[in-house]
Image (tube, rainbow, N blue to C red):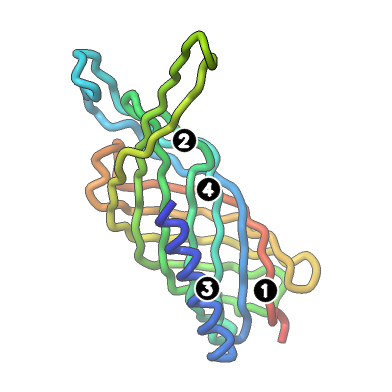
Amino acid sequence: MKTIRSTALSLFFFASLASLAHAQSFDVYFGVGTAQDSAATLSSDTFGTGTTYGGTRMGGLFGTYGADFLFSKHFGVGAESSFRFSQGDYAGLNYRPTFYDFNGIWLPLGGNKRIVPEVQAGLGGANLSYYYSSTYCDQFVGCSTSNQFLESSHHFQAHFGAGVRIYAVGGLYVRPQVDVHWVNNFYQFGSNWVPEYSAVIGYSFGHGK
């Protein structure tokens, strides 16, 4: 979870800059969604036993969180991260993907309306963490399961996103959003392009001022 901790520190850094720069507004948000990719064409003898495993599709429930601040009604910067809540199966192992990015933000209609379109573009990384899960049983203590972290694979990514903030009360809003991650050399899956669909709940401090 080093990537998540690093992103959290980055969000704190952005929050500090926001207060110093007297930004138009500062936003925090979290939500759920899913990221999808096709399975890679591979045949892997993961454990050297002669048993081979095929590729795995990416899917499942993802969590998203982030923060941004606006310098004006139309422009700002932000950072966000999304990660799979539970570990998935991958070639006899477990894995968890994490995406993180730092973005420029454009609000074409301005940020003081009730319905606010939003466009994001930026750079970041993708991380795949691998784990080995095993169960051991004996007659004295019964069965226990261990889940051991093995290694991580890191990739550069470019991020594009578009959504619509729908303000309910004050600065409270919901935002359905579509994101696309272009991940360099993402050979573990079938495509370098990873679409993500999410809905977040956020709050804008300074909305409407």
Look at discs 1 and 3 and give the one toward the viewer. 3
Depth-wise, is mark 1 or mark 4 nearer the camera? 1
Q: CA distance from mark 2 to mark 3?
A: 27 Å
CB of mark 1 within 8 Å of CB of mark 2? no
Tell me the amino acid under the disc marked 3.
Phe
C-alpha separation, residue under disc 1 versus residue under disc 4: 22 Å
- The residue that disc 3 covers is 12
Q: Which mark is residue 204?
A: 1
Disc 3, SS = helix
| Residue marked by disc 4 | 197
**Residue type (three-letter) at the residue carrying disc 4:** Tyr
Mark 1 touches mark 3? (CB < 8 Å)? no
Q: Is residue 23 above or below residue 88?
A: below
Q: In the figure, is residue 193 to the left or right of 177? A: left
Q: Quadrant of the C terminus?
A: bottom right
User: Residue at label 2?
Assistant: 87
User: At numbered mark 2, what does the secondary structure look like: helix, strand or loop?
Assistant: loop
Q: Earlier in the sequence, mark 1 or mark 2?
A: 2
Residue type highlighted by circle 1: Ser
Which residue is at the front of the view, 14 or 182?
A: 14
Task: Say what secondary structure mark 4 lies in.
Answer: strand
Q: CA distance from mark 1 to mark 2?
A: 32 Å
Q: Amino acid at mark 2?
A: Gln
Q: Position of residue 66 (x, y in %)?
A: 54, 64
* Mark earlier in primary sequence (4, 3): 3
- Classify residue 102 by image quadrant: bottom left
Task: Please tell me which residue lies in front, 61 or 74.
Answer: 61
> Which mark is in front, 1 or 2?
2
3 is higher (above) or lower (below) than 140: below
